[in-house]
Structures are given as structure tokens and as C-alpha cells.
Image: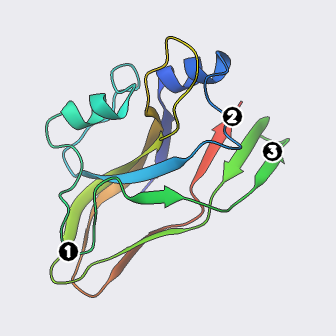
Amino acid sequence: MAVISTLSNYWKYQLGAKQVDVSTDTFKIILMDDTFVFDPDVHATLADVLASPNCELATEFGYTQQSKELTGGSWAEDDTENKGIRTFDNVTWTASGGSIGPTGCAIIYDDSTGSASPVVSPTVVGCIDFGEDFTVPDGSSFQILVPAIAIG
């Protein structure tokens, strides 16, 4: 299993246009249906992602749509990969009353609103493809360890 992270092209544009602030903006993470396929050219905003067939998992059994905020973490410099990395604390979903999923990936998005035009918010940062599908059984937890945004 190889986990692959892909940034959206719109995120890169918004970053260059100084419409996002990785230090102060609010970032959220959502789990996608196991048949969702991320396209960095098409999935620029949360609305684009949610308009896709088989998009975000339904609110049920311990998963609540668009509610998981990324918090904590820190900035680091990666001289080996020549990047700046903004990490966040681990994110956990615990199934209760039924199973969560199946899910094959997560979308990170910037839930803050920029101040200049053309800003479309929330902007999709990118997709974490888990490399396989997961279903979280009732009473079990699914955790993403140290989600991060790499810039560079």
C-alpha cells in the first residue's frame, strides 16, 4: 500500500496569489467514498468535490460531514526534499452504531475566506489517497497520523 498525496492546482494558484495563509487559515479534512477519484485540475473547491459522483461519506455512525478541523502541529523545514511542511495533530474517527466507509481517500480544504478577487472558498488543498479502501467497523477507530501540507 502506497499513500499518495496530490495538491490541487487551484490551491497552488491561491498560494502564489497570496489568497491563503497556511499559518492562520482554518483547514478541515473529509473522508471520501471509495469510488471517488481526485482530479487536481477539476477539484478546485469544496463545491467541485461535493458535486462529484460518490463524493463525501454520509453523516452517520461516528462520521459527520465537514466537521473535522485540523489543529495543532507546527512548521518544519525539509532540506532533503526542499520543502516547507505544515503538520497538524492526528485526526481520528470512531465508528459508533455501525461502520464508517468504505473510504479510499481524504480531502483537505482551506475553510477560510480570502479577501481579494478571484477567491473561491473553500479551496481544496489536495487529496490523501490511502492506496487501499478502509471500512471502520463499529467500535473501532480510523486515524490519519500527522496530516501535513508540503510547500515547495
Q: Residues within 10 Å of mark 2 (few under 14, many from 20)?
A: some
At 35% from the left edge and 51% from the top edge, which residue is drawn? 105
- Sequence-earlier tag: 3 or 1: 1
- Find out whether the residues at labels 3 and 2 contact each other: C-beta distance under 8 Å: no
Q: Where is the N terminus found, in terms of image quarters? A: bottom left
- Disc 1 element: loop
- The three-letter code of the residue at mark 3 reads Asp
Left or right: 82 as drawn, with respect to 96: right
Left or right: 101 as drawn, with respect to 16: left
- Sequence-earlier tag: 3 or 2: 3
The residue sitting at the front extreme is 115
Left or right: 131 as drawn, with respect to 17: left
- Disc 2 element: strand
CA distance separating discs 2 and 1? 35 Å
Camera-side mark, 3 or 1: 1
Q: Which label number is shown at residue 25? A: none
Where does the image place residue 75, in percent across and percent down from the top left? 77, 50
Q: Which label number is shown at residue 78? A: 3
- Sequence-earlier tag: 2 or 1: 1
- Find out whether the residues at labels 3 and 1 contact each other: C-beta distance under 8 Å: no
Residue under label 1, please give it. 61
- The three-letter code of the residue at mark 2 reads Ile
At 48% from the left edge and 41% from the top edge, which residue is drawn? 111
CA distance separating discs 3 and 2? 10 Å
- Find out whether the residues at labels 2 and 1 contact each other: C-beta distance under 8 Å: no
Camera-side mark, 2 or 1: 1
Residue under label 2, please give it. 151
Q: Where is the C terminus found, in terms of image quarters? A: top right
